[in-house]
Image: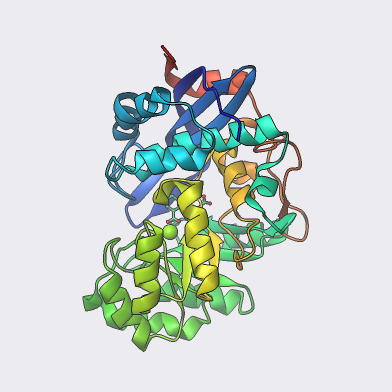
Amino acid sequence: MGKMKIDRIELVLCSLPYVHFFETSFGREKDRTFILVMAYAGGVCGYGECVADKAPLYSYETTRTAWMMLEDFLIPLLMKKSLSEPGEFYERARIFKGHPMAKAGLELALWDLLAKQKGKPLWKLYGGKYEEIPAGVSIGIQDSPSQLIERINGFLEEGYQRIKLKIKPGWDASICRAVREKLPGIRLQVDANGAYSLLDKKSLMELDAFGLEMIEQPFPPYDLWDHAQLQKEMETPLCLDESITSVETARKAVEMESCRVINIKAGRVGGITEARKIHDFCQARSMPVWCGGMLESGIGRAHNIHLATLPNFKYPHDLSASKRYYAEDLIEPPIDITPQGTIQVPHFPGIGVLPQEKRIRKASLKRKVFKTT
Ligand code: OSB
Ligand code: MG
């Protein structure tokens, strides 16, 4: 195989305001901070997005820890030796413990670069099978149930195939009841981002009454055991997000029966190489998966779309139109959904959408170039 001759890596710290605040069990946010990673080889540029946020709320990583990992360890590791494919970088980077989002940001840029060098869209490189994927929407905690229902109706009119509600103690069963009264037939699921413990079993059991497709991550990230205890008693499938950090934890979750569905995010698991391993493992064990999101800009979201074309992705994803997140996304054309509630997978090389340098510059807070010496 040929070598990927990387000339330089560029990091850009960006900030983009949301069109609507996003509130989860860990708080309300009005904008998103993230790192773009660009990998250059010859005239070709691969783009990745590191999904670490300002504060360590979803996981321990932050934009500053990710920048530090990239600058001090991951970029020097990449530059040390030539590379034939991104999976090789991922394997080498395993020597450094943790920091999956930092690793994934750089690995995604390498995947985009490789696909562009080969003149193929990423999904073809990955062996994806869908050319159109089902779109869902994740809706944050609102100020009132009526405001929530209004937002849900707006998204249903746009065609989204399922609605995911963020929940927390006090914004859970009563909210599901209010939504089900108005919208009995919609595909509905909830995500707690680890806001509960087994002491809350009674209020979690109440959720069985609402015909939810799944309950995502009721308990904190590293707790496969308590999820297994809850899954034994609940009819609604549990879905794990934060808990699944590698194919190894996926295996333990399957073997302990901690969940019946897994949400895959490349950033959470260290990149596409590990995400595909989890996908393949789950497929072999008949555990369906779907693609989660981290409110990415169009660059990160385009990567997610390609990943979601693999055959064991079996539910609508947290992949929505650009305009649902940002007034001005960083790419052209923006990601849009069809009236049937699907997203068409790009056919151009790499991520298949064009990052807009002017808009990146406008969003940027800090920029640094790392050259091969
Ligand atoms: O838990 O799935 C989550 C956003 C940020 C952090 C965690 C999560 C989310 C979402 C949004 O639910 C999904 C999206 O990108 O649309
Ligand atoms: Mg989640």
Q: Position of residue 179 (x, y in %)?
A: 54, 72
Q: Residue at 32% of width from left, 79% of height from top?
A: 228
Q: Is residue 244 left or right of residue 124?
A: left
Instruction: Work out which residue is located at the far top of the displayed protein and give it.
Output: 373
Observer-nearest of 342 and 165: 342
Which corner quadrant holds the C terminus? top left
What is the count of numbered marks?
Answer: 0
The percent coordinates of residue 267 (x first, y second) are 44, 46
Look at 31% across and 49% down and name the residue there.
59
Q: Is residue 226 above or below residue 16?
A: below
The picture quadrant where one finds residue 328 is: top right
- Give percent across and percent down for residue 103: 40, 39
Q: Is residue 94 above or below residue 227?
A: above
Most extreme residue toward the front is 1
Q: Residue at x 31, y 31 (%)?
A: 69
Please say if 102 is above or below 129.
above
Q: Nearer the viewer, residue 115 or 130?
A: 115
